């Protein structure tokens, strides 16, 4: 996180971007774990050895806040004064994030403790105080102006650490209003975000979910979490029933969800207009200084390579024995009944072997992190679900929370989360605090690259074709979900924004119409690849990420870059490994597009996106070869 609040409209976004999670894949926490050893629990005491130590830091932050308050109106006084003020702010955030990690992870390991919930709330309150206190920085820097700041750099060499963050503020000058304008915008920001909250409450709490009876007589209330579990079920009739139950409920609320989404889009339109951007899309891309071509090339190349996606759907149909693929046939695994277990020590060993192409130093650092207990391994009652890595405690180390269940999915998640953790570790090691935090745009590169390394390794050590099919099938489905599905959502999102920017009044029904064309195109409905029944064109209404506008495309760009880096390193391309490791150490020292480009992948060209399709084709070649061996 840069020590600057760089987003007038969303001061708390730091919280969201610095904790990187994979949503719950494996279900209940009550599974029978192997006996937990000390080694399997993380060491939160590395952050604070006692509650008193945490409270001491809280007091220090309050004290520094007062000190920082005196900077207001004085940033332009001298180079030295500017540097001192930034140092204080930097210290403030560094200390604050150590507290955030402690409060959040104490809560993650046991969500049922009231005291830790209270601690989290205290930290949240402190966070808003911090961003309020720093609100003057950007407007004041803009007033000081580029010419004077450039002079400061010459006078005070220690300002160098702030060069990029300062540049990032200065470049927004054309989109910053005068004092009065900014004050009005700040006041209105209080009333924004209502659409998002309404969506969240409706879909998480208030929705009267349908209940269905499955073939075995079991009754299931189909909410999103039951859906994500049962959509993989083997029985096709059950799958259909589960899908119909979920999507018909969303269809009932088409009108309401149309209103909430339309409201969200209108808000973006207004901000784009007053901040003098040609449209919502340009404003969103400008947040990270991304070339518009990144989005354009991504969507175009995904469309150009749709035959690869269609090949996958057809292959799926062939393996599952379904000649008439429907929307509810996309999720079940293509191999069943593989019970191979990977106890944690073996999982760790596999991962360490898999990332060997990254070099001995990388492997050594990872080994040390495991030994030093950065990770909490097993599910427990009341532990937070899913898995995540949190690397914001700059001078401590990253923390990883797993819910390891010994299946292959767990091993894959392990490699993914350690990818995040190592990215944070290397950036924190390689950068001064002000530029240590990396942007969301690059956040999923290291994690997806590690998954690619893992796949190669698993294929090498697989004992038989069944095992091979498991790894290939899971990699393929992962690429579909992270690349094609996210680009499909991104394409819809851009069209929806464009219409509202142009002043078109949108309704739930109209959103469905726009979406139906896109979802049918991606699934090859017209060519008879996957038939999309009308009911499933309401899919857009379910997507929480649409309330973080222009966010989902970054999954697709990240996995494209990650796979391409992994491929080049595995091939032993000269310099590939060094450039990649340099990217992982460069945090937020430059704009994320530039950092990735310097490492050898230009995300504003079709190449990285073509590489995803090529990779999927190669995986399918391997699957077909196995099927051929079996005479299928
Ligand atoms: Zn991730």
Image: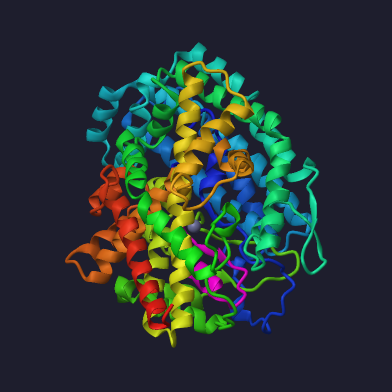
Observer able to see residue 431 = no
Which residue appears at 75% of the width and 64% of the height? 382
Residue in the foreground of this view, choosing between 570 and 502:
502
Magenta part of the chain: 394-415
248 relative to 71 in the view: left or right:
right
Image position of 42 with respect to 47: above or below: below
Which residue appears at 45% of the width and 13% of the height? 178
Observer able to see residue 452 = yes
Total tally of numbered discs in the picture: 0
Residue 221's quadrant in the figure? bottom right
Residue in the foreground of this view, choosing between 435 and 75:
435
**Identity of the residue furthest to the bottom in this view:** 463
Image position of 61 with respect to 572: above or below: above
406 in the magenta segment: yes
22 in the magenta segment: no
Image position of 476 with respect to 441: above or below: below
Identify the colour scheme used.
Answer: rainbow
341 relative to 82 in the view: left or right:
right
What is the x, y in percent for residue 568? 25, 64
What is the x, y in percent for residue 1? 46, 45
Image position of 616 with respect to 60: above or below: below
Residue 103's quadrant in the figure? bottom right
State the quadrant of the C terminus: bottom left
**Identity of the residue furthest to the left in this view:** 574
What is the x, y in percent for residue 538? 62, 39
What is the x, y in percent for residue 301? 32, 45
Residue 228's quadrant in the figure? bottom right
Which residue appears at 31% of the width and 76% of the height? 360
């Amino acid at each position: 996180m840069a020590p600057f609040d760089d987003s007038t409209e969303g001061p708390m976004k730091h919280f969201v971007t610095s904790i990187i999670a994979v949503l719950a894949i494996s279900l209940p926490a009550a599974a029978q774990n192997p006996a937990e050893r000390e080694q399997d629990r993380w060491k939160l005491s590395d952050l604070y050895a006692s509650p008193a130590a945490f409270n001491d830091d809280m007091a220090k932050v309050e004290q520094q806040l007062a000190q920082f308050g005196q900077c207001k109106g004085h940033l332009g006084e001298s180079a030295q004064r500017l540097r001192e003020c930034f140092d204080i702010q930097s210290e403030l955030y560094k200390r604050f994030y150590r507290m955030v990690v402690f409060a959040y992870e104490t809560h993650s390991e046991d969500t049922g403790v009231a005291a830790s919930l209270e601690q989290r709330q205290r930290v949240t309150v402190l966070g808003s105080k911090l961003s309020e206190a720093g609100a003057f920085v950007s407007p004041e820097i803009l007033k000081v102006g580029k010419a004077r700041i450039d002079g400061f750099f010459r006078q005070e060499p220690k300002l160098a650490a702030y060069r990029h963050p300062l540049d990032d503020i200065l470049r927004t000058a054309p989109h910053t209003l005068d004092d009065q304008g900014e004050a009005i915008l700040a006041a209105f920001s209080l009333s924004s975000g209502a659409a998002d909250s309404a969506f969240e409450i409706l879909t998480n709490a208030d929705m009267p979910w349908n209940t269905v009876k499955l073939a075995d007589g079991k009754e299931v209330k189909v909410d999103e979490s039951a859906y994500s579990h049962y959509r993989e079920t083997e029985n096709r009739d059950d799958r259909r029933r589960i899908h119909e139950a979920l999507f018909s409920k969303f269809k009932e609320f088409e009108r309401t969800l149309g209103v909430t989404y339309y409201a969200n889009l209108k808000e973006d339109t207004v901000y784009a207009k007053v901040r003098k951007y040609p449209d919502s899309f340009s404003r969103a891309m400008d947040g990270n200084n991304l070339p518009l071509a990144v989005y354009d090339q991504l969507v175009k190349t995904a469309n150009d390579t749709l035959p690869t996606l269609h090949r996958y759907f057809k292959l799926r149909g062939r393996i599952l024995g379904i000649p008439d693929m429907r929307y509810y046939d996309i999720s079940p695994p293509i191999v069943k009944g593989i019970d191979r277990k990977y106890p944690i020590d073996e999982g760790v060993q596999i991962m360490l072997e898999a990332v060997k192409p990254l070099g001995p130093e990388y492997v050594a650092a990872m080994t040390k992190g495991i030994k030093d207990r950065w990770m909490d391994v097993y599910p427990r009652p009341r532990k937070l679900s899913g898995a995540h890595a949190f690397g914001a405690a700059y001078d401590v180390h990253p923390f990883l929370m797993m819910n390891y269940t010994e299946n292959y999915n767990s091993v894959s998640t392990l490699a993914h989360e350690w990818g995040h953790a190592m990215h944070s570790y290397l950036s924190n090691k390689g950068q001064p605090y002000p530029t240590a935090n990396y942007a969301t745009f690059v956040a999923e590169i290291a994690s997806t690259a590690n998954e690619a390394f893992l796949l190669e390794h698993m294929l090498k050590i697989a004992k038989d074709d069944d095992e091979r099919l498991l790894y290939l099938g899971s990699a393929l489905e992962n690429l579909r979900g992270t690349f094609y599905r996210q680009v499909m959502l991104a394409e819809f999102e851009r069209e929806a924004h464009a219409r509202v920017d142009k002043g078109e009044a949108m309704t739930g029904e109209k959103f469905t119409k726009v979406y139906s064309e896109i979802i049918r195109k991606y699934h090859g409905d017209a060519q008879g690849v996957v038939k999309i029944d009308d009911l499933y064109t309401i899919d857009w209404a379910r997507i929480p990420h649409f309330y973080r506008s222009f966010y989902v495309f970054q999954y697709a760009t990240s996995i494209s870059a990650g796979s391409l880096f992994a491929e080049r390193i595995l091939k032993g391309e000269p310099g590939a490994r060094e450039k990649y490791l340099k990217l992982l150490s460069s945090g937020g020292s430059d704009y994320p597009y530039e950092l990735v480009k310097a490492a050898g992948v230009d995300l504003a060209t079709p190449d990285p996106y073509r590489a995803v399709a090529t990779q999927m084709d190669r995986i399918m070649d391997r699957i077909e070869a196995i099927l051929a061996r079996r005479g299928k």
